Image: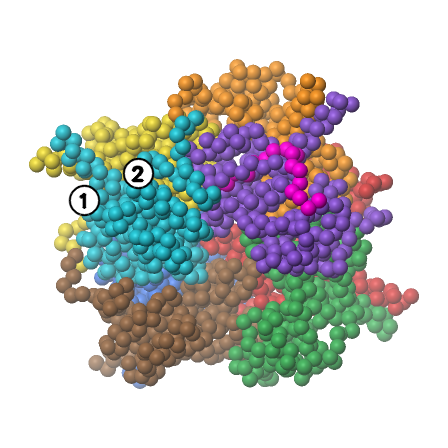
Chain colours: A red, B brown, C blue, D cyan, E green, F yellow, G purple, H orange
Amino acid sequence: MDSPAPRHKPLANQNVTVDLDRRQRCGFPEVVYGEGKSDDAVAAVFDELLARGEPALATRISAAQAETLLTRLPGARYNPVARTLRRNPAGAEPAGGRGRAAVVSAGSTDLPVAEEARETLNWMGVDVTMVQDVGVAGPHRLPERVAEIVDSDAVVVVAGMEGALPSVVGGYVPCPVIGVPTSVGYGANFQGLSALLSMLNSCASNVTVVNIDAGFKGGYLAGLIATRVADARAAGEEARDA
Amino acid sequence: MDSPAPRHKPLANQNVTVDLDRRQRCGFPEVVYGEGKSDDAVAAVFDELLARGEPALATRISAAQAETLLTRLPGARYNPVARTLRRNPAGAEPAGGRGRAAVVSAGSTDLPVAEEARETLNWMGVDVTMVQDVGVAGPHRLPERVAEIVDSDAVVVVAGMEGALPSVVGGYVPCPVIGVPTSVGYGANFQGLSALLSMLNSCASNVTVVNIDAGFKGGYLAGLIATRVADARAAGEEARDA
Amino acid sequence: MDSPAPRHKPLANQNVTVDLDRRQRCGFPEVVYGEGKSDDAVAAVFDELLARGEPALATRISAAQAETLLTRLPGARYNPVARTLRRNPAGAEPAGGRGRAAVVSAGSTDLPVAEEARETLNWMGVDVTMVQDVGVAGPHRLPERVAEIVDSDAVVVVAGMEGALPSVVGGYVPCPVIGVPTSVGYGANFQGLSALLSMLNSCASNVTVVNIDAGFKGGYLAGLIATRVADARAAGEEARDA
Amino acid sequence: MDSPAPRHKPLANQNVTVDLDRRQRCGFPEVVYGEGKSDDAVAAVFDELLARGEPALATRISAAQAETLLTRLPGARYNPVARTLRRNPAGAEPAGGRGRAAVVSAGSTDLPVAEEARETLNWMGVDVTMVQDVGVAGPHRLPERVAEIVDSDAVVVVAGMEGALPSVVGGYVPCPVIGVPTSVGYGANFQGLSALLSMLNSCASNVTVVNIDAGFKGGYLAGLIATRVADARAAGEEARDA
Amino acid sequence: MDSPAPRHKPLANQNVTVDLDRRQRCGFPEVVYGEGKSDDAVAAVFDELLARGEPALATRISAAQAETLLTRLPGARYNPVARTLRRNPAGAEPAGGRGRAAVVSAGSTDLPVAEEARETLNWMGVDVTMVQDVGVAGPHRLPERVAEIVDSDAVVVVAGMEGALPSVVGGYVPCPVIGVPTSVGYGANFQGLSALLSMLNSCASNVTVVNIDAGFKGGYLAGLIATRVADARAAGEEARDA
Amino acid sequence: MDSPAPRHKPLANQNVTVDLDRRQRCGFPEVVYGEGKSDDAVAAVFDELLARGEPALATRISAAQAETLLTRLPGARYNPVARTLRRNPAGAEPAGGRGRAAVVSAGSTDLPVAEEARETLNWMGVDVTMVQDVGVAGPHRLPERVAEIVDSDAVVVVAGMEGALPSVVGGYVPCPVIGVPTSVGYGANFQGLSALLSMLNSCASNVTVVNIDAGFKGGYLAGLIATRVADARAAGEEARDA
Amino acid sequence: MDSPAPRHKPLANQNVTVDLDRRQRCGFPEVVYGEGKSDDAVAAVFDELLARGEPALATRISAAQAETLLTRLPGARYNPVARTLRRNPAGAEPAGGRGRAAVVSAGSTDLPVAEEARETLNWMGVDVTMVQDVGVAGPHRLPERVAEIVDSDAVVVVAGMEGALPSVVGGYVPCPVIGVPTSVGYGANFQGLSALLSMLNSCASNVTVVNIDAGFKGGYLAGLIATRVADARAAGEEARDA
Amino acid sequence: MDSPAPRHKPLANQNVTVDLDRRQRCGFPEVVYGEGKSDDAVAAVFDELLARGEPALATRISAAQAETLLTRLPGARYNPVARTLRRNPAGAEPAGGRGRAAVVSAGSTDLPVAEEARETLNWMGVDVTMVQDVGVAGPHRLPERVAEIVDSDAVVVVAGMEGALPSVVGGYVPCPVIGVPTSVGYGANFQGLSALLSMLNSCASNVTVVNIDAGFKGGYLAGLIATRVADARAAGEEARDA
């Protein structure tokens, strides 16, 4: 099990190692989970990725962390609702166009998680449709907006409390629905357990689930599907061409 | 704290006591919870109620219990789906007409609980509309049938798995919705916990909850509301008359 | 699924949408859940409702939020115990008289939840009887006050710790009892789980349950029942009249 | 820590050891927990105790176990409701008179646990008052019978479902109340968890708790208190006498 | 909310309704969840689907159910490990070729769930690679077989006990990984809770989760992705062609 | 159920009612649970009790609360470890001598709960032996001190972490052992759940349990037993005398 | 990651693969977990191991499985208490002498788990001391037998109910203590959760824990330690010799 | 049970007792758990141990505690990541060489727990290899470093989130693996429950588990094994010599 060329690079900050062949192995470069990370650790990864021409994404970056990091990382952009930090090599939002995804959220307090999913999808180059505040208690709200999402390659559905929205969305769209339970609620919500169990028990066959408040993972899964579909179409066009 | 007249009557079966003034105190006579009760105990209560001209209802009566009890209690009727045993003093179904309630269920496996609710409502003299198999994953099913339930005084909604149906029904009807979570499902359903938590966390303001598989209690609450509304209307008519 | 006339109005604050036909669909206008909402969001809904002549209610408004909102919303009134903010179109408490409800609480620390229920009932126009500090460990306290609540159309019972009070109240009154478990307690109370499970397992047939600390929902359910009964009586009087 | 004389005696059945100085150390001889024990193991302890002139008690003895054991242990008596097996050296029920205890139960299905407590108290020589079927949903039932239990040295209260009865009893009697939660119930009862949490969170100061369905332990604790009180009184009489 | 043409057809068995436009809305016809369903109910759906030229799939069919159903449904095939029943209109296995998926399982006792996923994928026309018995405790086993799965459009990973396999697979493949926790294990496994929590907390970004033992849902999600990718490629080829 | 003379007195602070016949009904006056109570409420009860010549005890009084209350309640004494406030009518510690109890604690961090138990016992007039820091991991520590506790009428055993101490103490003493689990620990301790479950499952027959961190209740139960035993002895002496 | 020589051998029974280099990698050959395995699968592994001269061990073999397997596997031996099946190449118990371990159990119902640990240790060639029925409620029992275990290289402690024994043993011995919680108990034991949490929270520093009822794993860990210590001593002797 | 010579010494700080014969009984002196301990208590133990020539270790020492203690305890050294305080009698790091252990951690946020384990091992005189940031999602990372740990006498594996690393490490090394779950993660991690359950259910036979975040205990267990192995080798060398 010898490894002729190093696949990981230990950074100046000794406890962090950048996974150098992540793009090759996984299709996308490494993402920084910011909670509990030092500014040095976050900045080191961002600079390493910039040097390699890769777009950088960090999640769970607090406002306090962002204040420092924005001064250290020119060209980075902070989304205070999503609590994400991003930097593209070219200094601009990526071109998009690698498939279509939708992010649907139940209530306005679910927005931070929905925004984290959106930022992740944008970072992957996926076009995103946002549909907000369509929780199940207002039953006319979702049907009025189904047309905006029905052609997506994947739909991320973000909901707290009883977490019923993914099941309902799942009945309207033919693509995979990635449910993201949120910890929005109180009492017998048990910090998101209620929404999590709901989504795991969804009677809609096309609903799958990620961790509570895991907006990044919800967006990432949707992005993997959307980019794969887009790439397949492009490959089909090329194949026919050849 | 002397009690001049006995309010309870110990039956031949020494461990059971019939609550004699339940009708006066609660509006309806005592109901027998059959699980773990001997045939003697059930029959004794039924006969005591018959002697007092009261309709009798027993729940959680197994098929085996029913076989014996039907021979001992002439005029009784067993519903094998609901697992209920009933007997009316006049030997017939009560007249109905004391308000309107609906029992809505998500899937066909929720039917036993829905039927227990329906039997309870019938026993209370309430007119019942049954709407079955309208779970949220088939989003067109419920709206097509809202007209049948929208004028009810109370709606019992029975659902297992993710238990989302009460929230959706709650958005369509203005009356109280009594959610009855069922233990239908598997895995992370945890014997109905998933549906129970969903309903407790419903974002619909008009949803309240009873115990898992508690079809009787769901029906009873709906019946209390419906009969109270019906009685109020009748009282209004009488008052104006006077 | 065309919708000729818009049923929701996106407010200036883009993430909030007022549900315009809630009154028509549900009988009462939308209520604001204040936790995590910006002042702008709360104020926008209040002003929209005022413009439509509707009474406004917001729950879970912190003292800090209230301080700002009271200056922005002339005529609004804050209840610091209930943490509710209300404003009536006519600038005064509504007339009441739409049915009778009682709010019964076990201990003095349950008062915030009981007050939230009372404010909700008042907002709905229901007459409320408050009965406090009648927990089960002082067994003489409740019987002495049963006469005050026995004629209610619905009783909200607020209790933490072992949550036994709804069962006991349920034995005294013939109407629906809405149990509201509170998170009052410590240790094996598990933030209200103990009281919640107690109420769900109540041996009293007329007890139903809402979420832990859900004073609003408890009051709202009681209000739906009381106003429906009052309206039925009024309709009966009118019907006879016609 | 040398032990000149053996304190335990390994029986023929090699895996069981009778605790010989239990009476001296604890005041009462060893009790056999029958679940999963072989007939040989149970009989060996019974015979050893008989040889030492001690009364024997075994709990959780199934009907099948009892059938065999009654033939092997002449003079033993089986209580099929309590599932207990007892044998007194003199072949008769002990004289009683070592203090007064009461066993109060909520519903008829709680009887097996209540009976186990009663058998244990009788085995200890304590006089027992049984009060059955006084659950909280029939609020007049308990007050009518308080006079029978108020002078007890300890009260065992057995209840399933919401487990509220110990709190209420605790408000009526000045002595310790030992709550025994039972697994009677279904759904959100979670095999007795609901009643257990209720009793642990009792607002009555004099309520303590043992394991779910632990009728033996409930009775044993009450017996320890009652016999200690009785012995103290006797000692007082003797002391004065001396 | 009028519905000019019926979208559901109530079958002879009154409690079951076939969702007629499921194929149009979701891309695939309805699947029967066999647990608790009568033979009549299952057969009715199968016959209705056959009449419409659709392939039928039923899951959770016990051996006893299968015995009867196979005689009633000529051409149906039962997989006793997967507990699935299938019938294709043409009487043969579908052609396949709609994308590539892999089903990876940790231990031999996870096979029933893995087989349920495979049957579902075959029913959807997806080519499947099965990789069995590659749990993490034998760390050389998975790497030796990565080449077989690395080009899949989606990988279903089935694992009980500690449920670590999806995370490890997620590090090797760039496509979405659908984790299916199983209830295989004992003790602190808590019927699959251990594996479920593991997968929800996976540090691999491309892992999403379905319910415990939900082989069907795992397979269905993978199939939705694979067929969508295959269709996109075909569409690309056609587009270029046009 | 008329009540000719008021049994409760509403205080100036409207939400608090002093239970006037608690001494008569329960043997001891009411105790104030300080958490969440206003200074006014605590002071009102203390003053009412002083006026009636009763000793006052308040638990869960924070240092901040104590600072104010000590200035308002002359003669009161605050124990900062136990977080209790007490005041005796005569301005001094009560005479003691009403029975003997021991309070045994496992580790030094369990001391606050042990002290709360001790203060409660002192308030009841019981002589207390404190035995600290004898947790089971130092197996020689407890046996060396058994002689100090073996003659107690009741032993309160306070332990966090694995909560094993009550079982071990239970094997050494013949009297009731009241286990008080504490929330001392971390991780899988789950805020005291570990110790609570241990004590509920104790294999020692004489162990009963109160809520997590419930030092007051542990002490109160022990006090009820000890005073009852002492009173019985005194009554015996008197009876013989008469 | 090419693998020139196969490290696993798929057996005739296609779903089982024998891990051929387990002895080399882990020090001991593969063990069969019998639950849910077919007789063919178990026998195939046993025969493969015999062919390689390795001793075979299978755990969780039911009596029914054993009956068939004993006829198919000449020379195998079944322990009905431990539910283990073993076969040594030479047809006899292995020589032993690779270190010393003790297996200590609390009650007689814990014996099956203790026996599984003992069989595992014997299979590894470790000398085992069994100490039974020394639960903490009989506090004199363990100290009397400490001398038998104090020189062990590792002690396996098996206990259900409150699971306190490992902590106490841990205070007496200097070596690692492997706690094996059992599901023995009832009620708030929650199938072994109580004992598991106790052991995880042990205040003894030398206590580590395995899964509920995991007698094999407890024995295996102890065996790894004991054989490593024995081998080190032997290596020391050899080194000095060289 | 007399004890001629005191085995414990009560310190000036009355609530703390130093366990004087811990070294003799357990092989290592007492360790201070710093959480909630006063500076006086910690310093008293450190000074007592220094006087006896023993190395001192305190865990869970906050930065604030450390600031004071470092001034009071000359020669002590604080590790702010591990939150440990240590002092050796000779003022220097101990010589090491008593066996070899490895501490492997999954992510950089697990480092505090890993460092606590390392400090403990160093305090015991064991040589430690640290391997960090080799979580399972980067599957090439661990195999590249197996050579560094494969000859250890014990491996401590520290991991949060899904806690899969111990199982994977367990497949590579023949020695005992002590899994230390951490509370690193969010949502369905439930403060480390996810990792804890994973490790308890590990399919690797050589994995045992300690409490969540219990770096000390993980290190201590590994140290007990490593020093015992080292001592055995030394004893073997000496034995041969003799």
Quarter holding residue D187: bottom left
Q: Camera-side residue: D163 or B44? A: B44
Q: Where is residue G137 in the image (x, y as percent from the top left)?
A: 41, 38
Q: What stretch is highlighted in magenta?
A: G90-106
Q: Position of residue F44 (x, y in %)?
A: 25, 40
**Residue drawn at (48%, 23%), measured in percent from left and top?**
H19
> Is residue G137 in view?
no
Q: Which amino acid does label 2 sit on?
A: Gly
Q: Camera-side residue: F191 or C212? A: F191
Seen in the picture, residue F157 relative to A85 is either above or below; the reply is above
Describe residue D165's horizontal placement relative to residue G97 as left or right: left
Q: Position of residue E191 (x, y in %)?
A: 56, 56
Instruction: Kindly identify which chain the residue marked by label 1 belongs to.
Output: F
Instruction: Kindly identify which chain the residue marked by label 2 belongs to.
Output: D
* In contact (CB < 8 Å): disc 2 and disc 1: no
Residue underneath mark 2: D27
Please identify, in this view, whether the residue under mark 2 or under mark 1 is nearer the observer. Answer: 2
Q: What residue type is labelled 1?
A: Gln
> Is residue G92 in view?
yes
The question of residue A171 being in magenta is answered with no
Seen in the picture, residue B240 relative to E116 is either above or below; the reply is below
Q: How crowded is mark 2: few (under 14 residues within 10 Å), some or many (20 or more)?
A: some
Q: How many labels does the image show?
A: 2
Q: Which mark is residue B162?
A: none
Residue underneath mark 1: F24
Q: What's the magenta bit mostly, secondary-structure-wise?
A: loop
Describe residue B204's horizontal placement relative to residue B59 as left or right: right
**Residue drawn at (47%, 65%), measured in percent from left and top?**
B181
Location of the C terminus of chain A (image quadrant): bottom right
Q: How crowded is mark 1: few (under 14 residues within 10 Å), some or many (20 or more)?
A: few
